[in-house]
Image (cartoon, rainbow, N blue to C red):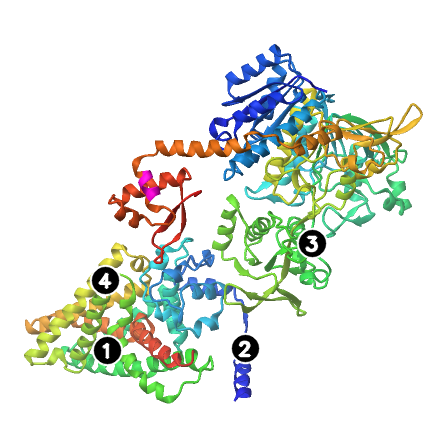
Amino acid sequence: MGWMKMKLTTITKLKIVKMARVNPKFSAEIKKYGADDFNACFNCGTCTATCSLSDEKSSFPREMVRYSALGLESEITSSLKPWQCYYCGECSTDCPRKANPGELMMSLRRWLTAKYDWTGLSAILYKSFASLLIFMVIVAVGVIAVAFAKDFNLNEIIHFGHYFEMYAIAGVFATILLPNIIRMWYFTVIKPGKKVPFKRYISSMADLFLHMFTQKRALGCDDNQTRWFAHFVLVIGYLTLLFTTVFLDWFSSESMFVVVLGYVVSAVVFVVTLLFVMSRIKQKTEVTKHSRPSDWMFVAWLFLMGVTAFAVRLFIDLEILESNLWLYLFHLIILAQWALIIVPFGKWTHFLYRSFAIYFEKLLEGKK
Amino acid sequence: MKERIGVYICHCGGNISDYVDVEELGRMFHKEDGVVVSKDVMFACADSNQKEMIEDIKNFNLDAIVVASCSPKLHLHTFRNVASRGGLNPNNYVQVNVREQCSWPHSDNPREATVKAAGLIRAGIKRVAHSQALDNIELTVKKSALVVGAGVSGMKAAIDLARTGNEVYLVEKDFFVGGHIVQQETLFTTGENSKEIVSKLFKEIKSYRNITLFTGATIEKVSGSLGNFHIDIKIRPRYINTKADYDLVVKALNECPVYVEDEFNLGLKKRGAIYKNYPDAMPNIPAVNLEVLQSSPEAMLQYANIIDLNQQEELLSFIVGGVLVTTGFDSYIPNSGEYGYKSSPYVLTLPEFNRLTELSSNKLVFQNREIKSVAYIYCVGSRQSKGENRYCSRSCCTSAIFSSLNIKEKYKDITSYHLYRDIRTYGKQEILYEKSSNLGDIYIKFEEKEPPVVEYNGKTNVIKVKDYLSAKMELEIEADMVVLVTGMVSRKESVQISEKFKIPIGSDRFFNEIHPKLKPVETVIKGVYIGGCCQGPKNISESVQSSLSAAAKINALLKSGTISIDPVIAVIDENVCTWCGKCEKVCDYTAIKEIDKDGKRVALVNRAICTGCGICAPVCPVNAIEIAQYTDLEIESMIDGFIQKIEMEVKEETTEVQQESESAKMKEYPQLWKDIIQNIGESKKTIPQLSEELTCKSEIVTYNLMTMNKYGIITADGMDEDEAYYYYKVKNR
């Protein structure tokens, strides 16, 4: 057996030398996604030491800061580390050079979102606020056009809205989100040449859903319980609202349970998002200091969705929606913009990418 | 031979007398031959005691004194002074160190300490008996200084020396002043224009009538010594007719058709054979490279009216009191192939690159290519763990970063890569590093054992480097230009300079100071000082600091007019000397010369240069050399004194006295101490044990044990099993 052992060690010692091309232009590119000061980094590693989620197995953010400074795109694309950060901001507070590693990690998540997106639209919308506005207006005009086509008949529009919601979810998922997750899987698992036995894909599935709905790992951040709880309530509220409107047909439902449930969850959504908006205005914590249009859009639209849905159902119950058609149209515009822009190409996707990152990480764990 | 000697033995307030029986020694040396007074004193250095000694000298008509006390480092001058005040020659005084050499090191054996002290004191008495009355050597100092090298350090030092009223000779090898700094457009960290600084200094130099500046001049010969150096210099001619029409000279300067390699611009361009280093170079008279110009008879004819072929090399000599050497440095020239230097295109050293950026206007172009990205490789020629230059050149990190910032500002859109080993932008220079890093310059750290490799792929330079900040990932960098950040090396002329002035050269080939901290600008040659980079790598601020501190030293020397030197020097017995030259060979200071003395060839010691190191004495085959204060007679009599048997009747007595005193002391001990000693007896005990057995609070036992330990009554002896408490035993049982 001795020779075999020897052979094995020689094989493991064979290291494929990888040449990476330094790309100074990457810095400028990543800065368009919000990062600004990371070039100041002098590699002391304080950020990695202070991070409560970084460990020997997966050490960040210094490594990502370094890759960004050198412009090693393929290293970043194949890395799951940006998704492992839940942005408590401690690294940015402690950074001796004010290089803001926390915001770089956030920007890398935006950049990766754009990178995973096969349409390339995410990149345009993240980098150019003007184009984001144009797309928003186009969708709004589209909704009004549909209403016009339906002669501004409320029932027909509500009917359309209901079906639009269902088809939009299915369509966006099938054409954008699913391919993008497959791309993420390709970039992080397949392209780096890591072989994962099929069995592990099944056995790791539990983690995917656990983290998708709970964001359990964010609890590992220091002093993050309140923020995690608010986020958790919002996720559950949002998903329940989605379920209530799409599958229980809240706006047309006669069931007392469904009606009340809808009121409660929509209220939950707008109250929690209002808190988030307020904290971004106050900018008291590291995480709320650096809001980009994509961040504002995300919380604002969630808030508007909750409020308008609540108001629409209230108007239905008060029987004044007929005379206030504009309210439903406004709700529908918000909904359409949400479903066609923010969900597929905006910040919404972090819901999927974060949990899939943990899932992929689980798949690769055996390989390390 | 001194026969009326006074001996004083100091208690040092117990420092000595606790272990050395000074009273007994005092009594003992009364009987010594030649000793008139022998006393023990509480503090020899105290005022009252000094007065007593002076009175003794007068009353007993003493001719020499010995004080046995502390180290001469502490009080030699105190007691020499006492001797002087008493009317003795200060050199008829000998200090014996019985504290650092007897009582302190031998506190465990007081009797032997006393015996040793007795031996040392007797040796001192014997030595002082043969001591000679020597006077300090007084030299007159010529009130003028020579400054070698008119770089920024030399110019600034010359101005300071002149301002304080000294005659200054400033000698520069080049035809123009300014040295290295004018080869950079602007200077870190403030971005001042180097040429403006030099022009300002030149103007100031011109305003002092007591500064004589020689350009194109070299040091030919140096003789003499401290206070009176004889300097011979040679001045090369410029060959410009001083009476020629200035407009014609300017025209020739601008239009000279005969071209020659431009040394000032490090070979990046050619210059005319009638030249100035740069348009505003000072002094404002061009120089002519006659050899090259003569190769073109038409040019010679054309410029016949401005060229003066009659100018000859000029020899001049003058005398100076002190010398300041500020000859600066050379930039390290990489070996061919070192990081692609000379073997790949687009590889320059930092000084070359600095010339290039200054000569380029709105576009940075080198060999027909516009430079858009620059990779700087640091520590080239410095910090070579296996090479000759093991030192750090101190200024190159900042210099490279400063250049990278400048070209970024001048040409926009330049990408900079910094391949470094460590960034040493110390002090305020750190701000430049931070600025560069904030601007997005990419810093890549390599180690000496895995240096970057520069290759030219036909289109561009590709540098392969292992980045120690990315887990040694192999990186590839494309850069239009590779700049080797070269350090400083000693000037190639420094060997000749060293030979002329006898300045020692260190292993780094720079000039050596006496002590890096306490005598940082002094050399072992009295009157010769060093400043600036000839001593080792420095930035401009540090260079000027050191040269100004040397200037202050020289000024103090010149201002004194005379200097007084310790008379401890070699003395030749001319009757014995037969001149073999061996002493001259071994003398590091060239203090010994052969002379003719009444028809006999003998050695002569230059009293100003000799340091009394003593190396010449043992090599003399006929024993003609003595070192004053350390003559054979003195040293041999000391040895005789020391080996003489100490007749100490006290031998038995001391032990008895000691025992007696111990039991006497015992009577004075507190009751608890006696109890503790009795309780411990022959065994050893811990604090809790004693506390329990003596039914005494452990704090009280602890406190008393500590005090007893301090007085040496008990001592710690190992720890208990749990390693929680020390065992104590009674000492000296």
Residue that numbered label 3 is attached to: B388
Of pointers 4 and 1, the one earlier in the residue sequence: 1
Looking at the picture, tell me which residue is in the foreground, B91 or B585.
Answer: B91
Pointers 2 and 4 within a single chain:
yes
Instruction: Look at the numbered disc 4 and give the secondary structure of its residue.
Output: helix
Disc 2 secondary structure class = loop
> In this rendering, which labeled residue sits more in front, label 2 or label 1?
2
Q: Residues within 10 Å of mark 4 (few under 14, many from 20)?
A: many
Q: Chain of mark 1?
A: A
Mark 3 residue crowding within 10 angstroms, few (<14) / some (14–19) / many (20+):
some
Q: Are marks 2 and 1 on the same chain?
A: yes
Mark 4 or 3: in front is 3
* Residue B162, quarter of picture: top right
- Highlighted magenta segment, given as a residue range: B673-678
Q: Is residue B59 left or right of residue B134?
A: left
> Residue furthest toward the right?
B599
Q: How many marks?
A: 4
- What chain does badge 3 belong to? B
Between A53 and B566, the residue placed more toward the observer is B566
Marks 2, 4: nearer the viewer: 2
Judging by the rendered image, the residue that carries numbered circle 4 is A276
Q: Which residue is mark 2?
A: A15
Q: Amino acid at mark 1?
A: Val
Q: Which mark is residue A146?
A: 1
Name the spot of residue B71 as percent of width and height, x first.
Answer: 57, 31
Asked if residue A221 lies in the magenta stretch, the reply is: no
Q: CA distance from mark 2 to mark 1?
A: 60 Å
Q: Earlier in the sequence, mark 2 or mark 4?
A: 2
Tell me the distance, in whole angstroms, between the alpha carbons under discs 1 and 3. 83 Å
